[in-house]
Every structure is written in C-alpha cells, then in structure tokens.
Image: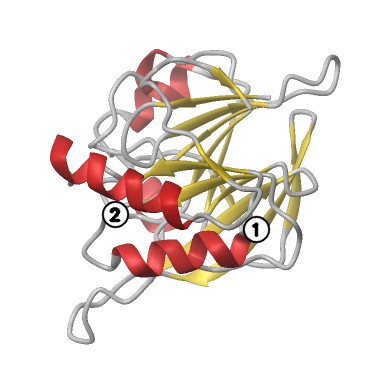
Amino acid sequence: MQVTHFGHSCVLLDTGSPGAGARLLFDPGQFSAGFEEVRDLDAILITHQHFDHLDAARLPALVEANPRATLVVGPGSAEETGKLGLAAELVAPGDTLTLGGAEVAVVGGEHAVIHPSVPVPPNVGYVVGDGAFYHPGDALFVPERRIDVLGLPTAAPWLKSGEAVDFLRAVAPRVAVPIHQGLLNDIGLQLTYGLFSRLAPEGATVTVLTPREPTAL
C-alpha cells in the first residue's frame, strides 16, 4: 500500500493489490496542491463540504480527467457537488461500497464542534479494506475495527493537540500519518509532530509524509 499526501487533508491511497487494487483520492481541497494532476483514479471521496476538503474550482476538472472514478459524497457535500453538475454516489454512515478492488466502509456522521454558535455540516469518515486505512475528515470518530494506517488530524479550529493525542491513542494504529496541518507554520508542525511521537501508544509509529511523494506503508 502506498500513501501520497498532497497537503492538508488530501490523500491518495493506492492499495497496490495486483488485480484487485484501487486508487482512491480523499478530500481534494483548497489548501492542497498537486492532486489535480492525479490520473487513473477509481474514486474521489469527500468527507464534507468545507472548502479545505472540497475545492469547487478544481474538482470538476479532476472528475473529467478521471472518467472511471466514482465521486463519493456524504450528506454534507451532495448539494455542493450538485451545484457543480457532478454526478455523485451519496453515502451515509453504515454504508459499504466497492471502489475498484477495495471495500470502503462509511463511518462517523458528525463534524467536530468548532463552537456552539458555529453551524457545522455532516461529516463522514472512510475506512478502506479491513481497516487498512482510515480518513476521518473533520471528526474524531473511533471505528470499531482495528486500523492499520490512520490519517491523523493535526490542527484545526475544532481541535486541541491533546484531543488529537487522545484520538491517536484510542484508534491505536500501526502507523499514523499527520494530515489537516495546513494552518500551522514550521514551528507549529515541529512541535505538534514531536508531541504525537512522544505520546503515541505503544506499537504505533508517527510517519510524516513528504508532500507528493508516494510512501509505502
């Protein structure tokens, strides 16, 4: 399995199973760069409608350049993709779908609270395979199944570093790859990544991915 991080929450997962693999792109948003060049996708999956997860300006061209890709959206994204004239498969927590050669389970359903006075859209997370990879979007939902590689939210208006550590410990993956880090400068990244590494549960490794570079995990 290879994982490529395009910055912030955009992740390309290549399951790499001969004859049964899948290329899945998650959350191509405005804070991410380079995803528009990705081809041969089996699916584009959106966790929710916020602009840092769904770039309305670049998404239509990405869909057009990947004609066999299924666009997968939750209840919070369907209206936005509809405005763009894009056909999409609407999913909800509890659904399971097959994309390419991969099974994907839809989990969660609620965006984390930013502030009680700030409305937030629904948010769905995606678990690939039998827990091979988990992208939670903007939420800290802990799936029931064991997770091998976790996309770990790093910094957000809805997130404290201690909450991210507690989420990491609750999921207890083999590998955590920090995502949703676009709001931090280099000092903040170094501090937060160091905290994750020091406080990770036993057996878990925190691996910071080089942008746009496929990494075997």
Q: Secondary structure at mark 1?
A: strand
Q: Is residue 92 visible?
A: no
**Is 87 or 30 nearer to us in this picture?**
30
211 and 30: which one is in front? 211
Q: Could you tell me residue 123's position as x and y percent?
A: 45, 64
The quadrant where residue 57 appears: top left
Q: Which mark is residue 106?
A: 1
User: Relative to residue 5, is residue 156 depicted above or below?
Assistant: below
- Three-letter amino acid code at the position of disc 2: His
User: Amino acid type of disc 1?
Assistant: Val
Counting the numbered discs, the total is: 2
**Could you say where residue 209 lies in the image, as x and y percent from the top left?**
43, 27
Q: What residue sits 73% from the left and 68% below the top? A: 144
Q: Residue at x 51, y 54 (%)?
A: 200
What label does residue 50 carry, if any?
2
Position of residue 153 in the picture relative to residue 129 (left or right)? left
Q: Which residue is located at x 37 percent, y 29 percent? A: 60
| Residue 110: x %, y % from top left | 46, 73
| Marked residue nearer the N-terminal end (2 or 1) | 2
Above or below 151: residue 160: below
Callout 2 environment at 10 Å: few (<14), some (14 to 19), or many (20+)?
many
Displayed quadrant of residue 182: top left
Residue 206, visible in the rendered structure: yes
Where is residue 181 drawn, in percent x and y?
A: 28, 44
Please identify the quarter of the rendering in which residue 18 is found: top right
Q: Using the image, determine if residue 48 lies above or below residue 174.
A: below
122 in relation to 152, above or below: below
